[in-house]
Each structure stands twice: as C-alpha cells, then as structure tokens.
Image (spheres, rainbow, N blue to C red):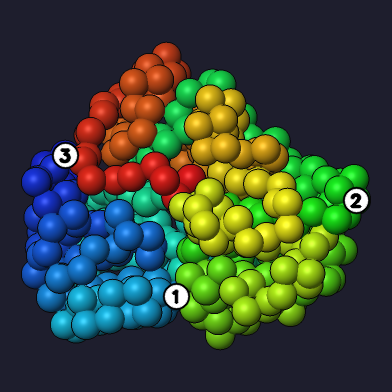
Amino acid sequence: MASLHPERWVRVCPEGLYVVPGDVFIDPVRPVERAIITHGHSDHARPGHRRVLATPGTLAIMRQRLGDGAGEAQQALEYGETIRLGDVTVRLVPAGHVLGSAQVVVEHGGARIVVSGDYKRTYDRTCPPFEPVPCDVFVTEATFGLPVFRHPPDLGEVGKLLHSLEVFPERSHVVGVYALGKCQRVITLLRACGYDRPLYLHGALQPICDLYRGFGVELGELRPATVAAKEELKGALVLGPPGAVADRWARRLSDPVVAMASGWMRVRQRARQRGVELPLVISDHADWDELTRTLDEVGAPEVWVTHGREEALVHHARSRGIRARALALVGFEEDEA
C-alpha cells in the first residue's frame, strides 16, 4: 500500500503547523489544546497551551520563563523516546540549537515528516548535536538562508574578544548575548579558550545560567555585574542582554568596549546601528552551507521552509531536484540568532 503523503495530514493554520491525525500543533503561535514545543525561545514556546509535550530541558525553561503559562499539563519526552498521539507516532531528536531543543519526528500512514524547529550544525558544549533523520518531508527554518551567510569558526570569534582584552587591558568589555543559549554558549567558548577568570553577568542572565548548571553544563565562576565596583570591572568581561549594552546600565562600566555575539553581526550595518565596536559572528542557527548540507543528509524528496530567507533555500532545493515550498509561517522572530 502506498504511503499517505504528509501534505494530506499536516496543515498550515493560523495557530501554526497542525498534525491532523494527532490533533496536535507544533510550536503554535496561539494558545491551543495540545502543543509540541521544539525549544524554549519565546517565539516558539508561547504561553497558554493546555497540554504541552517537550524535552525535560525545554519544559524547565518554559516553567522558569512562563510560570503558570507554561501549560496546564506538561509531558516530558526524552530524546529518542517514542509516544503515540492519536493515529501518529512522535519522537524528539536533538536539534543542536539550545538546551533541550529538539526536532519533531512524526510518522503516519507509512510516511515520516521531520520538523526541525531552529537548529545549528556547529559543535556546542551546552546541548547535544543535531541528528539528521531521513524522512519524506523535511520542514526547515531558513533564518540565514542566503549564500552570504557563512559563519566563521566560533572559537576564532571568541579569540577576537580575548585579543581585544589583551590590547585594552584597562577597559571593560561588555558583550551583548541573548539570555537563553547564546549567553551559555559564549561562556563555554571562553572557558574552552582557557579564560578562567570570573565573568560578570547582568541580572537578567543569571536564572537561565543557573538552569543550565542544573542540567550539568559547567560555566565556571559567574559574578553579578550590578553590585561589582567600577574598579573591579576594569579589564573584566561583562555579559548582558543586547538591549542593556547600549543603555545606562553599561555606562557605569570602565570605558567599555561594546561587543555583540550574533549571526547578524555579519551585516556591518546592523553592528553600526547598535553601536557595536567589536562584532562577533556567533550564531545558534545554521548558516547557508549547513542548511544545504542538511538537505543532502536527510535525503527528503520534499522540503517545506517555515520562516527566514525562504526563497533562496526553496530555489536551491528545486535546483537539486527536490520539491520545495515556503510555508511563510508568521510569528517567528530573528532576534535570537
């Protein structure tokens, strides 16, 4: 018997991607009865769902960030564990994006669809690496889906930061990082490069760092920047949310060098607009080469692109003989890149 193609049982609705025979949405942007959440960033993990299925890491992040809005009932699913929802089977495999991030593998009627969520292919000490899963339809993001986006080695970018510390030892260096994922990754990259001095954190970053530690991620000594004396912060590394590095919070630092860790730092205009002196191209999303390599590795004859630079990736896929279309899902942001 021929398999039942996923386009017959997966729909794009105003709430998001809906798996009909499982009666479940994947990363819905509006409150729903049942949701599978790929990871804890706020554009994917929204409040108000009644029943939520995700990895233990993602559920912990949601509880910390959303409190009672994290779902009336929560069910944890470990990587590789299979569960049946209605007439479909579901399992979660690593996406390599942030702690707890997962791809959703759904099977029904002899066909398999994989929804990637956000992902990257670069090694990250804070989460398991992306796992390619062969499938009939691969649903992928395309945040950096243009050939111009090719991320440099992340250790080299952190090396630029450490070199600046050597050149300007009297200046504080403040690095804009997103609280979930980017902060912890930059910290572990610094530790991997041998930086063992205390790191100073804006208060908004501490809770997620504590959560990562609870999942066994070593971050070294972290100190609150707010209560540190100005003299103590001379020559120190200070991490803060992107919005804080340009406001009054950063002005108390000692002649700060302003850095920002983001894939968007490849675009010089974005760096200038944010007043960034030291752009660090460190992203938690796949670049162009990683996106196209992933299409080859999963071997799906059909690709659906959820958000980002859909047109270029769709064109590339079609040039390789892959059926491809853009879903143009709304509500997914680019700020966490």
Amino acid on which the number 2 mark rests in the picture: Glu
At horizontal 16% and vertical 82% (from top left) the residue drawn is 72
> Mark 1 or mark 2, which is nearer to you?
2
Residue assigned mark 2 = 166
Q: Nearer the viewer, residue 55 or 253?
A: 253
Q: Secondary structure at mark 2?
A: helix
Say which label, 3 or 1, has the lower sequence index.
3
Which mark is on residue 7? 3
Q: Are marks 2 and 3 in contact (CB under 8 Å)?
A: no
Q: Position of residue 44 (x, y in %)?
A: 30, 57
Q: Which circle, 3 or 1, is nearer the viewer?
A: 1
Locate residue 101, reporting x and y percent: 44, 62
Task: Please report the residue visible at 33 percent of the width from the left and 80 percent of the height from the top.
Answer: 63
Which residue matches tag 1? 57
Going by the numbered disc 1, the residue's amino acid type is Gly
Which residue is found at the position 65% from the left and 46% from the top? 259
Task: Give whichever of discs 1 and 2 has the lower sequence position.
Answer: 1
In which quarter of the view is residue 52 placed? bottom left
Density class for disc 2 (Cα within 10 Å; few <14, some 14-19, many ≥20) is few
Q: Secondary structure at mark 1?
A: helix
Residues under numbered marks 1 and 2 in contact, where contact means CB atoms less than 8 Å apart: no
Q: CA distance from mark 3 to mark 1?
A: 30 Å
Please tell me whether residue 207 is drawn above or below residue 105 in the rendered image. Answer: below
SS for callout 3: helix
Marked residue nearer the N-terminal end (2 or 3): 3
Q: Residues within 10 Å of mark 1 (few under 14, many from 20)?
A: many
Residue 65 is tagged as none
4 left or right, relative to 182: left
Residue 298: where, in percent of width, then height? 47, 41
